[in-house]
Each structure stands twice: as C-alpha cells, then as structure tokens.
Amino acid sequence: MADEKKIFTNIENVVASATLKQNIDLNAIARIFPGVEYRPEQFPGLVYRLKKPKTATLVFSSGKMVCTGAKSEHQSKKAVMKVIDELKRNGIVIIGKPEIKIQNIVASAGLGGYIDLEKSTYSLKRTMYEPEQFPGLIYRMDEPKVVILLFASGKLVCTGAKYEHQVHTAIAKLQKILEEKELIYYDKKT
C-alpha cells in the first residue's frame, strides 16, 4: 500500500446547457455577427465562438443553448453569460436571466501507478473490459455517478460528473479501492 499519492487531475471539457425561455432570431444574429457559423440547411443551431474563455456555444431558435469547451464550471457559466451580454449589447432582445445547468464534465488524471486491468475486471463491480476492442477498462461508479475509462498506465478519463468536486471524489475513491484491493502498483521511485 502506498502513502498518499498526488493525483494530477485536469478538467478537459465542461458542457453546460442554458434556457432563455424565449425564441431567438438566429438570422438576425448571423447578420449582426459575421463571425458566427449558421447554416440552417445543415444544422438548426448557430455556433457562437468565444476566444476568452475559449468555448463554442450552440444557440437554437427555441432559446436553448449548449456551451462546450470550458475548463471549469465557473468558466462555462461565464461563457454563456458573455454570449448573452454580447447579443444584448448588439440589439438582440433577451428578457430575463438564463437557467444554466452543467450537463457533463470530462476530466483526465494520472494515478501514478500501474493497474492490473484483468484483475480489476473481477474485483470491481460494473466493469467492462475487452482489450481486443479497446485498451481501457470501463468502470461505472454509482456514487458519485460517473464513468471512468481506466488504462494500465494508471491514466484515466472520468465523464458524467455534474460538479467538479464529484470528479475529485470519484478519482480519490477509485484510487483508494485500487490500493485496498492491491490492483495498483507503484514504482519504488515514485
């Protein structure tokens, strides 16, 4: 069993949805903002990209929005509000405040050890491991409710969290389980 190992977690993408509770004229936005992408014959939404924070927000005529690319919950909400503020400043009428909800957080991490995926398949509940199809083990955690793709290198991808703290909780919990069941092996140098 290892002493407390430092886990490096990186939030890769936060997906947030927003509802404006009103219809939006996408053609008007496309006329005012020449930088947006709007091809209604290909896709019903308009793509509004921001440089800071670097995100893409899909805006639909129903008033629904989906923001992707943010690196934190805060950044995601800030991006949605920035898009709305820019629209308002340029004459697009928006009444009320949006309801913003985090839909998914994707994070990567390194546990700093090697994992016996074959043994983990039998020791952990709710796993799927087919190395001839995909090199990672798929682990569905109940609490917090996330899915973790776990690789023999100790690297992982966590998806499905709605809050950043759930990512950290899930990864710490997984590492503890792996250590207790002796499924992770640390180099003597680490």
Image (cartoon, rainbow, N blue to C red):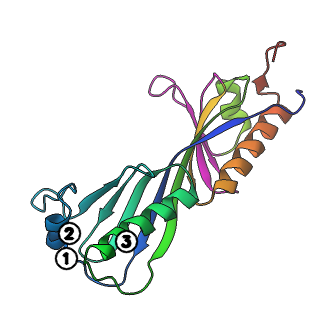
The three-letter code of the residue at mark 3 reads Ile
Q: Are marks 2 and 1 in contact (CB under 8 Å)?
A: yes
User: In which quadrant of the rendered image does the C terminus lie?
Assistant: top right
Residue 101: in sight, yes or no?
yes
Q: Nearer the viewer, residue 91 or 58?
A: 91
Give how far apart the Cα atoms at labels 3 and 1 are.
13 Å
In this view, 137 is above or below 70: above
Give how far apart the Cα atoms at labels 2 and 1 are.
7 Å
In the picture of the structure, the residue carrying the numbered disc 1 is 25
In this view, 63 is above or below 186: below
* Label 2: few (<14), some (14–19) or many (≥20) C-alpha neighbours in 10 Å: many
At x 79%, y 14%, the residue is 187
In the picture of the structure, the residue carrying the numbered disc 2 is 29
Q: Are marks 3 and 2 in contact (CB under 8 Å)?
A: no
The three-letter code of the residue at mark 2 reads Ile
Q: What segment carries the magenta color?
A: 126-153
Q: Earlier in the sequence, mark 3 or mark 1?
A: 1
